[in-house]
Image: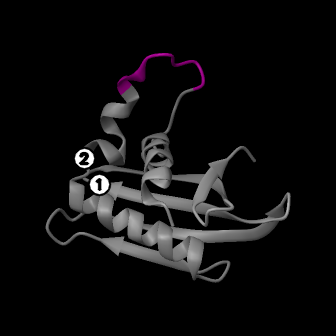
Amino acid sequence: MNLPAVCSWLLVAALLAAPLPVSSFNLTFLNNAPASHFTERDWELLRGAVNASLEASEDGTAVAWENPETGHLGRVTAVTSSERDGAPCRELEIYNKAKTASGNSRYLFCKQPDGSWKAVAP
């Protein structure tokens, strides 16, 4: 899996896990998103959980991560597997908790011809 390709989507997924009021155009809500508190080690653990979910877990199985140094944690669950234009795809539900912030988000990833996974529009 090409982790740099997924990292940008993980950042978006983690940041968007915070609740967003529909009428809000102010981005200060990101200050309380779980990812705003993440350390580099937290990101490494999250990327590992995403990789395990995309490559090896069965649908419905959660892959948990936790950083005992920060107390931050989360889980990545492969919700469904499908195919799009002949490529395998997996919908992931990503839950993260850091300090008092927590949230869920869902993203669809499809495997690219080079073997990497890319987040795509549902």
- Mark 1 and 2 residues: CB-CB less than 8 Å, in contact? yes
Task: Please tell me which residue is depicted at 40% across the width and 70% down the height of the picture.
Answer: 48
Measured along the vertical axis of the image, is residue 71 above or below residue 105?
below
Please provide percent x and percent y for residue 61: 59, 81
Please provide percent x and percent y for residue 103: 46, 51
SS for dot 2? helix
Question: How far is mark 1 from mark 2, CA to CA?
Answer: 6 Å
Q: Is residue 25 magenta?
A: yes
| Residue found at the far left of this picture | 69
Q: In the rendered structure, which amino acid carries the disc numbered 2?
A: His
Residue under circle 2? 37
Measured along the vertical axis of the image, is residue 26 above or below residue 91?
above
Task: Please tell me which residue is depicted at 42% across the width and 45% down the height of the picture.
Answer: 11
Between residue 79 and residue 1, name the one nearer to us.
1
Q: In the rendered structure, which amino acid carries the disc numbered 1?
A: Ala
Between residue 40 and residue 102, name the one nearer to us.
40
Q: Is residue 43 left or right of residue 118?
A: left
Q: Is residue 95 magenta?
A: no
Q: What segment is highlighted magenta in the picture?
A: 22-28
SS for dot 1? strand
Residue under circle 1? 98
Q: Categorize mark 2 by other alpha carbons within 10 Å: few (<14), some (14-19), many (20+).
A: some
Q: Is residue 20 left or right of residue 119?
A: left
Name the chief secondary structure element in magenta. loop
Q: Using the rendered view, name the quadrant where residue 46 is placed.
A: bottom left
Specify the label residue 24 is tagged with: none
Task: Please tell me which residue is depicted at 57% across the width and 82% down the height of the picture.
Answer: 56
Q: Using the rendered view, name the quadrant where residue 70 is placed.
A: bottom left
Q: Is residue 12 left or right of residue 42?
A: right
Please provide percent x and percent y for residue 119: 62, 50
